[in-house]
Amino acid sequence: MLQSLKRAAPWVLAGVTIMMAGQALAANIEVSGKSDLNIEAIAMFLLFVVATLGITKWAAGRTKSASDFYTAGGGITGFQNGLAIAGDYMSAASFLGISGLVFANGYDGLIYSVGWLVGWPIVLFLIAERLRNLGKYTFADVAAFRLAPTPIRVLSAIGTLVVVAFYLIAQMVGAGKLIQTLFGMDYLYAVVIVGLLMIVYVAFGGMVATTWVQIIKACLLLGGASFMALMVLAKFNFSPEAMFQKAVEIHPQASAIMGPGALVKDPISMISLGLALMFGTAGLPHILMRFFTVSDAKAARKSVFYATGFIGYFYILTFIIGFGAITLLLQDPAYFKAGAVAAANGSFSPADMIGTGNMSAVHLSQAVGGSLFLGFISAVAFATILAVVAGLTLAGATAISHDLYASVIAKGRASDGNEVRISRIAAVVIGLIAIFLGYIFEKQNVAFMVGLAFAIAASCNFPVLAMSIFWKGTTTWGALIGGFLGLLSATVMVILSPSVWELTLGHEKGSALFPYDNPALFSMSIAFLGIWLFSTLDRSARGDRERAAFLDQYVRSETGIGASGATAH
Amino acid sequence: MAMDQGALVERVKHDPQFHELVRKRSRLAWTLTALMIAIYFGFVLTVAFHKEIFAQSLFGGVMTVGIPVGIGVILAAFVLTGLYVARANTTFDDMTHEIIERAGK
C-alpha cells in the first residue's frame, strides 16, 4: 500500500501541476477576454515537464541508497558533471539579466559577466579535488574531517541553509515574475508550479534526476543562445565590427556603450564584489555538492574545466545577444511600450522596452526565429529556473538530513534509509517554504539577495572550508567563531548597506551605516582573521588533537587515500 | 585491500616523493590562483581607475580595446583551468599512483 502510494505520488503531483497550469491558462483567457498566451511556449514547456518527469521516474527506480540519493552513486562522468554544473550555475537571471544589461549599457554587461566566471578557476585550483578526496555528500564532511563534528556541522548547515534560502527566494520571485510575463500566467500559479515541480524532481529523483534536469537545461540553453548569437552575427555577415558600428549608430548612449560606463562606482565596492564572486563560488553548497557525484579527483577536475568552458562560452553569447537586441530591436516599435517615443534616428530608449530591458533576449528570439523560437526560448527560461531551484533544494535537504539529522541528532546512528527519508521530507518542506516565501516577497525588491548569498558563501562557508583544508592550526573553536563572525558580519553589513537600508527598507538617502553594497572585502577578512585568532588562542586538549590530526588529513586530501568511491551499479 | 588505510597514510607521510608531489602541485595551483586574481583584478581596477584605456578604439573603428580584453579574461579563465587539469591529471596523478602503490607493498 505504502509502496504503491509512493510510486503514484510523483504522478499525482505532476497531474496537479499540469491541471493547475491548465486552470491558470483558462482563468487568464476568461479575465482578459482575449488570449495573449504564448501557446508554443506552453506546448514546449509541457514537453520539457513530461520528459523530465519521465527521467524522474527512471531516476526514482535507481535511487536506493543514501549515496544514490545525494550523489547519484558517484557515477556521473566529468563531462556530464561539467554540463550539470553549468546548468546549476547559469540562472535565468544571468541569461536575461546580463543580456539586458548589455542591451541597456553595452560594455558594462561584459564586466559583470567576467566577474561571474573567475570564481571557477579558484574552485579548481584550491577546492575541487580536496573536497572530493575528503568528503562524501556535503562540504561539512570536509570541514568536520578532523574538527568536532557536532558544532562544525551545525555551522556548515546554517551556512548552507542561509545561502540556499536567499538564493532560492531570489529565484522564486524572479521565476514568478518571468513566467507571468512570458506565459501570461498568474504570479501565484507560476510560483506554485515551480515549487511543486522542484519538489517532485528532488524528493523522488534525488541527485540523479536533478543532474539530468540540469544537463538537459544546459544543452537547451546553450543551444538556444548559440542559435540566437549565430542569427545575429549572420545579419552582419559575421563581422562584429559591422554589428558594433550599427549599435553605436542607433543606441541612445552612442559610442559610450563600447567602453566601461557607470557600473563601477568606487574601487572598494568593485574589489569587494570581485572577492564575493571569486570566492563565493567556492562556498556555494549546491555547487560544492556536485563534486561528490563523480568517481574521483580526476573527474572532479575535469568537471570544472568543462564547466568553465561552457559558462564562459555562454557569457560570450549573452554579450552578442545583448548587442543583437540593440541592433535588431531598438528601432522596432513592436517591442516597446505603447506610449514610448522614438528619438530622431528612430531608436527607442532601452528602458521603454515591453517587460523592461530584461526581456530583450526574449524579444530578440522572436525577431530572429519567429514565434516558434520565442516559444522555445520562453520554455528554456522556465526550464532554467527549475534546474537551478532543484539544485538548491537538494543542497538544503542534504544539509538537514546528512549534517543535522544523521550527524548531530542521531550521532551517526541513523540508517541509510532513515537518512534518505528525512531528506525527502526536508525537500518537500523546503519546497513549500520556498513557495510561501516566493509569495510573500512578490512585491519586494529581492535583487540584493543573490549578492548576499555570494557574500555569505564567501565569508562563512569558504573560509571554514579553506582554513580546515590548508591550515594545520585550525581548531574547532577557531572555525566556529570565525565562521559565525563572517556569517553575521556579512548579513549585518548587507542590511546596513545603501541597497537594502535605503532602497529596500525605505530609509532616507544617506542614512545607511555601511557605505558599500558588497561586504565581502570586510566580512571575509573578519572570518579569516577570526579563524586564525581563535584557533591560535585555543589551548584546549581538543585543539591540540585537531592540530595533530592535520597531517593525516593532508595526506588523504592530497592523494585520495580512503576517498569514498563510486558505488557499483 | 592489502593493508588498512591508517598504515597506508602513515607510510605516505614519510615518503619524500609525496612531499615532492605536494610541493609541485601546490606551487602550480597557487601560481595559477595568483595569476587569475592578478588578471581579474587588473581588469577590474583598470575599469575603476582608467576606463579610458578600455574605451579607446582598437583599430581606428568602433571596436574598443576593452572588448578583446574582456573576452580575453574569459578565455584566460578557461585556459588556466585547462593547464592545471592537463598537468594534474597526467604527471601528478601518475606520481600519486606510484606513491600509493609503493606504500601498499
Image (cartoon, rainbow, N blue to C red):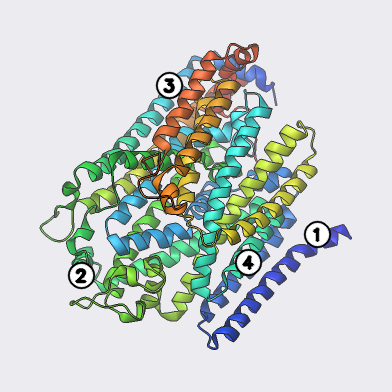
At x 36% / y 62%, what residue is drawn? A99
Residue occupied by mark 1: A6
Q: Residues within 10 Å of mark 1 (few under 14, many from 20)?
A: few
The disc placed on residue A246 is 2
- Give how far apart the Cα atoms at labels 2 and 3 are: 53 Å
- Give how far apart the Cα atoms at labels 2 and 4 are: 41 Å
Q: Is residue A264 above or below residue A253?
A: above
Do marks 2 and 3 share a chain? no
Q: Quadrant of residue A556?
A: top right
Amino acid type of the residue tagged 2 in the rendering? Lys
Residue occupied by mark 4: A193
- Give how far apart the Cα atoms at labels 3 and 1 are: 52 Å
Identify the subunit bearing mark 2.
A
Closer to the camera in the image, B19 or A37: A37
- Report whether residue A384 is seen: no
- Dot 3: element: helix
- Give how far apart the Cα atoms at labels 1 and 4 are: 20 Å
Closer to the camera in the image, A64 or A374: A374
Task: Tell me whether circle 3 and circle 1 mark residues in contact (CB < 8 Å).
Answer: no
Residue occupied by mark 3: B23
Q: Quadrant of residue A231?
A: bottom left
